Image (cartoon, rainbow, N blue to C red):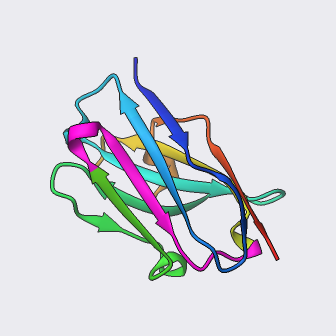
């Protein structure tokens, strides 16, 4: 079974940084795209970043460029999301997900989802 375990969330002050991890199992890690999404209270889920674990190529929505960095460690079957200069508006539950359709930020193309990790940014 495909399993995704997101971790690393917590409470951080505005301006701070966090690194989220997504540990994956149950599929051939380097043949898929893995994405990070987030859902803030009362808002729709949105894409944050994605990575093709086969070649390391990445894609970011314009709003996230320069603020987050996605990376993968294929030896550990883990994808990371480094977030810097966090703002209260970044408060959300962050999810990682797997897509077999290649590098995409389209949420509907992600088939398997982890349980999410909560990030709270205080002002």
- Say above or below: 58 vs 15: above
* Residue found farthest to the top: 1
Left or right: 85 as drawn, with respect to 10: left
Left or right: 106 as drawn, with respect to 29: right
Left or right: 111 as drawn, with respect to 88: left
Find residue 118 and report its horizontal and vertical position in percent. Answer: 69, 49
* Residue depicted at 42% across the width and 71% down the height: 60
Which quadrant: the C terminus?
Answer: bottom right
Number of numbered labels in the structure image = 0
Q: Is residue 84 magenta?
A: yes
- Say above or below: 122 vs 96: below
* Residue depicted at 46% across the width and 65% down the height: 82
Tell which of 72 and 61 is nearer to you: 72
Tell which of 120 and 60 is nearer to you: 120
Find residue 90 and report its horizontal and vertical position in percent. Answer: 69, 69
Which quadrant: the N terminus?
Answer: top left
* Residue depicted at 50% across the width and 47% down the height: 108
Left or right: 47 as drawn, with respect to 38: left
Find residue 89 and report its horizontal and vertical position in percent. Answer: 74, 73
- Say above or below: 51 vs 54: below
Q: Is residue 104 visible?
A: no
Q: Is residue 74 magenta?
A: yes
Q: Is residue 13 visible?
A: yes
* Residue depicted at 20% across the width and 39% down the height: 75
- Say above or below: 14 vs 120: below
Examine the image and state in which quarter residue 43 appears. bottom right
Examine the image and state in which quarter residue 57 appears. bottom left
Tell which of 65 and 123 is nearer to you: 123
Q: For the magenta stretch, what is the residue range?
A: 73-88
């Amino acid at each position: 079974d495909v399993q995704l375990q997101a971790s690393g969330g917590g409470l951080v002050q505005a301006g701070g940084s966090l690194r989220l991890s997504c540990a994956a199992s149950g599929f051939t890690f380097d043949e898929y795209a893995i994405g990070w999404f987030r859902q803030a209270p009362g808002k729709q889920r949105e894409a944050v970043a994605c990575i093709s674990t086969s070649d390391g190529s990445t894609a970011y929505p314009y709003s996230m460029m320069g603020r987050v960095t996605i990376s993968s460690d294929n030896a550990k079957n883990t994808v990371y999301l480094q977030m810097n200069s966090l703002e209260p508006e970044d408060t959300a539950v962050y999810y990682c997900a797997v897509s077999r359709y290649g590098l995409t930020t389209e949420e509907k193309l992600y088939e398997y989802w982890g349980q999410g990790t909560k990030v709270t940014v205080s002002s």
